[in-house]
Image: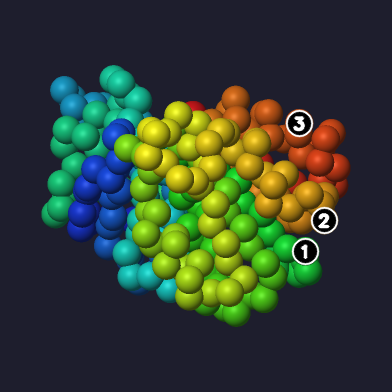
Amino acid sequence: MPVPSYIITCTRNDKIARDVYDFRFTRPGEFSFQAGQFILFDVGLIENPADIQTRAFSIASAATEDELVFIAKLKEGGRASRWIDEKLKPGDTVRIQGPFGRFIVPTQSTKNILFIATSTGVAPFRAQIIEALERKDGRRMDLVFGVRGEEDLFWKEELEELATRYENFFVHFALSNPSGDWKGHRGRVQTLVPLIDPDIGQREVFVCGSPDMTKELKQLCLEEWKVPKESLHVEGYI
């Protein structure tokens, strides 16, 4: 069965942190997905738009939102990074394919949930958290969100507002290289997780970030924190 494709129109493209962009598109009426899935964008070379390759991005918007939300951390010279930074603007159209992926919160589980993300690895968690809260999922949900410094932090106000509005959602920021003014946790996400719940093995644990980070967290979860393999969900990005 062929993968469906759609033409979507950019509605905004904003730099929201040091090297992070938040870019949004119209959502076709027939496009459906599950929180945690990703799509493939057709991305042409800046110098030769006819030279097209696909690039994967997690959907950061919930199914109840009208727009499709994505975020990207720029890689110098990268095809998609240059397209987002140099070319993409409101009104532009682009072809997508999808959705793909099984990085889905199991609704049949009764375990509390722990989301662990670094930088743009938070994208699928935004969708998953909003959807779970809106469907009145009563499980405790903690998001551990790590970046280097304050200039790398984004969506802070939105996530804090969700934590204020819903009594079962908690957000925790971990900065590995903050300024002297930072009042929150100093260190990597790995050092913050055990402070939140000493019994992580009883959680559904979701991890998303760079391959190095996800590899290290997977090892910690299985070997040190005793998370059962079936309760550990890991997705890395390149």
Q: Which residue corresponds to mark 2?
A: 202
Quick one: SS at disc 2?
A: helix
Q: Amino acid at mark 3?
A: Gln
Are circles 2 and 3 on residues that touch, CB within 8 Å?
Answer: no
Q: Residues within 10 Å of mark 3 (few under 14, many from 20)?
A: few
Distance of label 3 from label 1 (alpha carbons): 21 Å
Colouring method of the image: rainbow
Quick one: SS at disc 3?
A: helix
Residue in view at x 72 percent, y 44 percent: 194
Residue 83 vs 142, above or below: the answer is above
Residue 27 vs 54, above or below: the answer is below
Quick one: SS at disc 1?
A: loop
Q: Residues within 10 Å of mark 1 (few under 14, many from 20)?
A: some
Q: Which residue corresponds to mark 1?
A: 111
Distance of label 2 from label 1 (alpha carbons): 7 Å
Q: Residues within 10 Å of mark 2 (few under 14, many from 20)?
A: some
Q: Earlier in the sequence, mark 2 or mark 3?
A: 2
Q: Amino acid at mark 2?
A: Gln
Residue in view at x 37 percent, y 39 percent: 181
Q: How many marks?
A: 3
Left or right side of 201 for 174:
left
Are circles 2 and 1 on residues that touch, CB within 8 Å?
Answer: yes
Q: Earlier in the sequence, mark 3 or mark 1?
A: 1
* Occupied quadrant, residue 78: top left
